[in-house]
Image: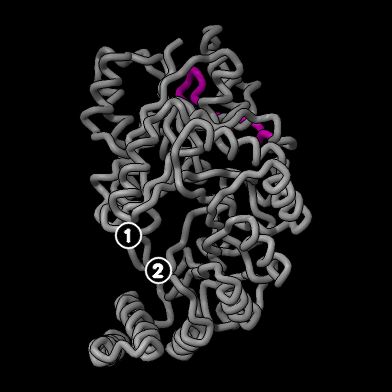
Amino acid sequence: MKIILTHGYFLQEDEKELQIMKPYVPLGILCVAAYLEEQGFPNTVFDSTFQSFDALEKQLHTERPDVVAVYVNLMTKLNVLKIIRTIKQAPELQHTRIVLGGPEVKNHITRFMESGADFIVSGEGEETMTELVTALQQKHTTFESVKGLSWKNANGETVTNATRDLLKDIDKLPFPARKKVDLQFYFDAWKERHGYSMISVSTMRGCPYTCKWCSRAVYGLSYRRRSPKLVVDEIAWIQENYKVDMLWFVDDVFTVSHKWLRDFCDELKRRNITVKYEIITRADRMNEEVIQLLAASGCFRVWIGAESGSQKIIDAMDRRVDVQQVREMIRLTRRYGVQAGTFIMLGYPGETRDDIRETIHHLVSSDPDLYTLTIAYPIKGTELYGEVEDRFITELDWASSTDRDIDFKRTYPRRFYEYAVRWVYNEVQFHKSLKKSSWLKLPVHKTKSVLAQAGMWWASK
């Protein structure tokens, strides 16, 4: 049986990412690929990141696979639909079965099936995918026993089987099949743009927190962690097989368990492994000891989530964190020589001009090294989506749009928040320039700040 796994993300089509140039290998399909190999199902991974759609189409026509499994998220959805059409329209690929998985599929099963998918894998993919290809190899025509699977019966009706339980012991999973892709493309892209290379690693699955805007479509509301020893084993393997400068831990809350963190740091020290790494976490899962451990073990940057400087908005998001604690942890992190970054989301339901002003105060007073600014949008399946669904003001064609295109009735029109992004950025940069005595930049940022506020006033009329 010929199996190809891909993900439909093409870097050359992403103008923003081309500017940022921080691509990461698709760990999800590499995990499924490794598990399939372990279970006796050889497979090929077509990593589309540095390829073209034409190259993918050529490989499909050349290989004529029995199964094409595609990871789908918000960014790749439209290309995935194009991949489905390409396969269905090719006479020589009529035998190819299309399997979709990833965070985008669970809440759009019917639409993806109507668009030509043969199977949908909801939740974790390793066991479901293995049982599915086993059934296909045995030429089964019904698939009722495969938990976590949606499929079409003889009448063409979509059948969704029972939900599959999450894997309890993820230590049993093999390392991602990184050898199936050419990581040198990633290393070179990072090195050329940033002067160093980076590779991603996952130590946990799920998140125990309940932020209303966050999708939990794959791992659910859970927390499962690989043992510190196994994580360090993977780091050692990476260092033995690749020349890479830094690691990016993709976990939602890296310091959620302080005991795990201590054991991880001890294991690195015991084996004399030196590593430089970057993480995401929450302020309420940090303290001085945690920051000391991170700094001592090679952490050079910590992203501390807050999303707003207004406690009112943070509470509306169900973030369950105190904004003052976020500020303190950002400052404390920097005092220990570790870079601190944070995320800001504007346009959340109920946000006013005063809340945005609080966010500016938050960024100025905490003074993170880095911060990102985005405008909130609802993802289907999240609590935020449910709260604003009756306030949608955009009528979109599902097959040609994504949830990122959805707008809803907010305190002010979306255009207001687009100007607000410029206001926040330029006001914060004004204060950063003031602190650094960058006098030439001061009038530029202040002028742009004033113009942005004028735009906000105009947009709110």
Q: Position of residue 361 (x, y in %)?
A: 49, 88
The amino acid type of the residue labelled 1 equals: Glu
Q: Secondary structure at mark 2?
A: strand
The residue shown at (62%, 70%) is 319
Q: Nearer the viewer, residue 341 or 448?
A: 341
Q: Position of residue 77 (x, y in %)?
A: 37, 43
The residue shown at (58%, 44%) is 202
Residue 205 higher or lower than 86, as above or below: below
Q: Position of residue 359 (x, y in %)?
A: 48, 83
Q: Nearer the viewer, residue 328 or 459?
A: 328
Q: Nearer the viewer, residue 195 or 441?
A: 195
Q: Which residues are magenta?
A: 150-165
Residue 364 shown left or right of residue 54 in the figure = right
Q: Nearer the viewer, residue 149 or 219?
A: 219
Mark 2 lies on residue: 374
The numbered mark, 1 or 2, whose residue comes first in the sequence reads 2
- The dot on residue 53 is none
Residue 239 higher or lower than 366, as above or below: above
Callouts 1 and 2 close, C-beta under 8 Å: no
Residue placed furthest toward the top: 138
Label 1 Cα neighbours within 10 Å, binned few <14 / some 14-19 / many ≥20 = few
Residue placed furthest toward the right: 259
Mark 1 vs mark 2: give the one in front: 2
Residue 326 shown left or right of residue 14 in the figure = right
Residue 67 higher or lower than 31, as above or below: above
The amino acid type of the residue labelled 2 equals: Thr
